[in-house]
Image (cartoon, rainbow, N blue to C red):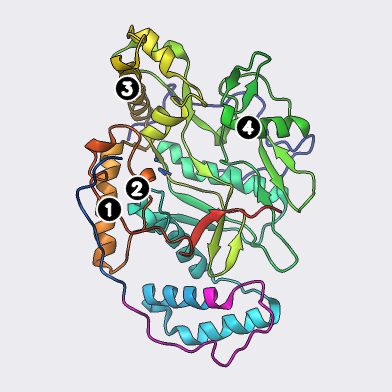
Amino acid sequence: MSLIFDRLRTRSGNRSGERGTRRPAAAPGGACPYSHAHVHGHLVPEEPPEPAAEPPFTDRPFTDRPFTDPQQAADFIRRFHAEQPAAGDPQARIRAVLDEIDRTGTYEHTPDELAHGARLAWRNAARCIGRLYWRSLVVRDLRHLSSADDLATECFTHLRTATNGGRIRPVISVFAPDRPGRPAARILNQQLVRYAGHPGPDGRWTGDPAGGQLAARARDLGWKGGEERFEVLPLLVQERPGERPAWYELPEDTTLEVPLSHPGHPWFAELDLRWYAVPAISDQTLEIGGVRYPAAPFNGWYMGTEIGARNLADADRYDMLPTVAARLGLDTSSDRTLWRDRALVELNVAVLHSFQEAGVTMSDHHTESERFLRHVAREKRAGRPTPADWSWIVPPVSGGLTPVYHRYYDPVDPALRPAFVAREPW
């Protein structure tokens, strides 16, 4: 991976980490890919071995359902000990967990349980094609933090750590969990970095329409958003239900952006397109063994099609295909000329080329498809199924040319845990 030169830039301007007019403590220094026709193969992994029968609940009646489900807790502890033999026999730990749930309504994971649970949540993510590297996830245990200022500061550190000078690291930062009568703070952004959208009086958008709702909310809170096409949204954190969220500008060293160019068309750089390096999902709840962590931002690295075939190409996002087609001189008078297809390929070529030139980690959809099947084979050898949502695993460009297209996959089990799940509204 090459070094980062002038072709890679961070956001300039006032990125001070401000919360309205109040500045949080300075962040410490240092530095997924998640998208039809005849299906020809059928993959049926072996059934996982049944765990030894254990009666942790037969003599423990629960008249009132506790905040944390004891069955989910015990199931996770068994899974953790089965996959981490050095942790020893699970029975003593199960008894301790159940006693803690009896007394408090919930329980606290050990650091090792938290780290393994977070990695399992990635392994179980049925819509993610990049699961081969689930063991490499860096888990930041920040459960002692619950204030908006602390969350913002550590989210900025997360971005610096994940960016890693362009060699993107998969990272998750796990903040305080929900507890009985004490819901934990939430991050309101869909991603830690995302661009704002500004609707005009004629119905046209400046920027990303997907960021329009959060931009409007941030402006209501006092954010002085402009009208730029690629304007990084502030981070919004809400500590308690019904409380006014706090907002924070992202410091300039947290947001690495890649300007886009094309290896064969010099005019492409004139379009002044760019995209950020780290896709950090921040609006999902991490659920491990019945414990819910509503603030647990996590990232992998981008697959090129996420940017080139969706974010920049979708008609309800940046809608760049007509512009690229016009610069290519394509006949756009009929869909039968396949002008969208041709423009789409060149847009994706530009994205892959630009990230490579900038030295920023990115995978292409052919390579990532092959890696995913390696993951499937590895999980089969371990006696585990690989749940997968076919419509998300098959990439949005040249799907039929990738090996993931010609397969059946294990069905998605909505109850599978640990998992990243949709956050429950307050």
Instruction: Choose the circle earlier in sequence order: 4 or 2.
Output: 4
Q: What residue is pinned by disc 3? A: 341
| Predominant secondary structure, magenta span | loop
Tell us which disc is closer to us: 4 or 2: 2
* Label 4: element kind: loop
Q: Which residues are magenta?
A: 49-73
> What percent of the width, then of the height, locates residue 295?
61, 53
Residue type marked 4: Leu
- For the N terminus, the image quarter is top left
Q: Residues within 10 Å of mark 4 (few under 14, many from 20)?
A: many
Tell me the amino acid under the disc marked 1.
Answer: Tyr
Q: Earlier in the sequence, mark 1 or mark 3?
A: 3
Q: Earlier in the sequence, mark 2 or mark 3?
A: 3
Between residues 10 and 426, which one lies in front from this camera angle? Answer: 426
Pointer 2 residue? 390
Rendered image: mark on residue 233: 4
**Mark 2 or mark 1: whose residue is earlier in sequence:** 2
Q: Which callout, 4 or 1, points to the residue nearer the camera?
A: 1
Q: Residue at x 24, y 40 (%)?
A: 402
Q: Quadrant of the C terminus?
A: bottom right
Element carrying mark 3: helix
Q: Quick check: is 72 in the magenta stretch? A: yes
> Of the residues shown, which amino acid type is indicated by label 3?
Asp
Q: Where is residue 199 shown, x and y percent of the image?
A: 65, 21
